[in-house]
Amino acid sequence: MHENAWLYELENRGFDVDLPFWVSLLDDYQPTCVLDIACGTGRITFPLLTSGRAQDQSFQIVGLDNSPWMLELARERAELLSERDMNAVHFVEGDMRDFDLNQTFDLIVVGFNSLAYIYTLDDHRDCLRSIRRHLAPGGHFAIDLIVPQLSYLAEAQTSVPVMRLELDVTAPEQGVKRLLRFATERFDPISQTDDTTYFYEIYYTDGRQERFTDDLAWHMYFPRELTMLLEDAGFRTVERYGSYQKTSFGPRSMHYLWVMTADNLELKTE
């Protein structure tokens, strides 16, 4: 999927409901150096850059992603900025489970459920500890993850997966007359992973048609599990929001929008 950066862009076109939340963290914590992990094509990176530079001309942001195709598109976008803004954003290819950028950051964000694409306990620990090492003293680390919904999990464990239409869009400016995306999902309660198969049908304006599938798995974090993983990595949660409007986290919350710090805490060893 990450090889098809244009398709990723098209699928997520218009999704910006989370952006005010991320931008609000700049007001809350006044960072001058931000790391956007799993930045993709810069969907969150660029709004943070714009708002951060408006507050402080020394503001810098780094985007980290493991997809060279995504980063290529992000860098192309950066080239459209003014020279001063272009010099304030940098994109780095790397694995969020183990990275070393040789600097620390006042704010580190991982949006769009991206931490869910880590599957083993060892990888969870490695990722969070890598993040902890890059957090400056007094800095903050913020995440956005989907909260498991019991009604959904029950349906996803049925013996016969149900195919549903998830997306139906057009983009004639990109040569796409119609894009259809169907999906089936299964939940594995042992590994706590949601295994999704996407079925694509793309009809191009030049008459071509394309059909293909793509498999994607993501880990479902339960609240106590997530809390323990964060504490094990040396984090202390300072804000627990349950929505992009910053309502308190509770039984009906759909998202973990948590903010952590690591002040005066040492990284735990095995």
Image (cartoon, grey):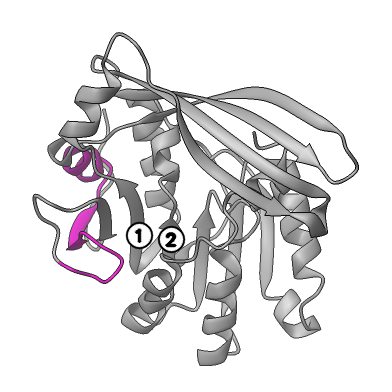
Residue 144: x %, y % from top left: 35, 53
Which picture quadrant has residue 47?
Answer: bottom right
Q: Nearer the viewer, residue 242 or 260?
A: 242
Q: CA distance from mark 2 to mark 1?
A: 5 Å
Q: In the displayed structure, does residue 123 sit left or right of residue 247?
A: right
Q: Quadrant of the N terminus?
A: top right
Give the amino acid type for the residue marked by disc 2 in the picture: Ile
Residue kind at label 1, given as amino acid type:
Phe
Residue situated in front as seen by the camera: 259 or 196: 196
User: Quadrant of residue 178 in the image?
Assistant: top right
The label on residue 108 is 2
Does the magenta portion include 116? no
Residue 190 lies left or right of residue 216; in this view the side is left
In the image, which residues are magenta? 226-247
Question: Residue 191 in the image: x percent, y percent?
Answer: 30, 17
How many callouts does the rendering have? 2
